[in-house]
Image (cartoon, rainbow, N blue to C red):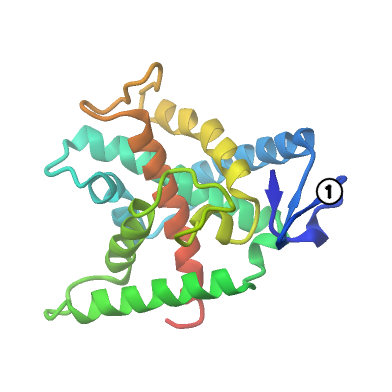
Amino acid sequence: MGLLRRRDAELGILPVAGRDDLVLVAEQAVEEMVSGLAMMTAEYVDEGQIDDDVARALSMGFPLVTQREAPTQEALVVAQSVARFGFMARVAEWEMLPAARRPVGWMLAGLRGAVKSSVAEELKEDRDGQESFYAALGEVTAFFVGREPLDVPYDADEGFLLMWTIPGVGGDARALLRAKTLPMALERVGQSSNGNTGPIEGSVVEDLERVWKYGFALRSFEEFFRGDR
């Protein structure tokens, strides 16, 4: 399990060959950290205030990521709950781990540049000037989430490897955090994720896992623009 900054891993760490930004942390330590993040995520969902523009962007996670036309209102409600948990999982990570607030590294610089230029292009193409920043950010986030597999190994050859490049915990730990918080999100709207079929007709669990990742990435990409607006 990887943490992206050595200074934050005082738990019996091992280096990762060829990667100065990653360390291996004992499984028990990761479990404890993820459990703490899951509890904080649920608290932030209960207590956190989300602007209307952000809420609309989160509600569009399911149709944007799955490319499904005219989703039902039920689908949108479920998807917004899932995306909100992903969004607040990043907030919890940001607050809990100093490593999550250290925007360094060439891979992150490349991702930041690509996201910022893509959002600028999206807004430029809006000739009527009616598209909000968060609507454009949602479109761009969905593109980046959809262009790679749900879970990517840290040593994959291609792509931005979102969950390994965004600073904080590594992709494996984030997958565990998603597994812990996705059932919480579904319980909030009276759904369950038993079996291989998701709670939205015609969907599978991976659709909702991708929506969670969309929410997480939306908040992470938002951080790239702090001080710009």
Three-letter residue code for mark 1: Ile
Snapshot quadrant of residue 143: bottom left
Question: Residue at coordinates 28% horizontally, 38% vertically from top-left?
Answer: 77
Residue 141 placement, left or right of 179: left
**In the image shown, does 26 or 199 lie closer to the viewer?**
26
Expressed as whole percent of the image width and height from the top left, the position of residue 153 reads: 55, 47
**In the image shown, does 201 or 109 lie closer to the viewer?**
109
Residue farthest along the top direction in this orientation = 195
* Above or below, 89 relative to 95: above
Expressed as whole percent of the image width and height from the top left, the position of residue 121 reads: 27, 78
Question: Residue at coordinates 47% horizontally, 28% vertically from top-left?
Answer: 183
Residue 36 placement, left or right of 206: right
* Above or below, 54 relative to 184: below
* Above or below, 93 relative to 173: below
Residue 149 placement, left or right of 96: left
Question: Residue at coordinates 53% horizontally, 53% vertically from top-left?
Answer: 156
Q: How many marks?
A: 1
Residue 195 placement, left or right of 111: left
Determine the secondary structure under disc 1. loop
Snapshot quadrant of residue 43: top right
Expressed as whole percent of the image width and height from the top left, the position of residue 163 reads: 53, 53
Quadrant of the rendering where the N terminus is positioned: top right
Expressed as whole percent of the image width and height from the top left, the position of residue 10 reads: 86, 51
Q: Which residue is mark 1?
A: 13
Question: Residue at coordinates 63% horizontally, 50% vertically from top-left?
Answer: 170
**In the image shown, does 2 or 64 lie closer to the viewer?**
2
Quadrant of the rendering where the C terminus is positioned: bottom left
Q: Residues within 10 Å of mark 1 (few under 14, many from 20)?
A: some
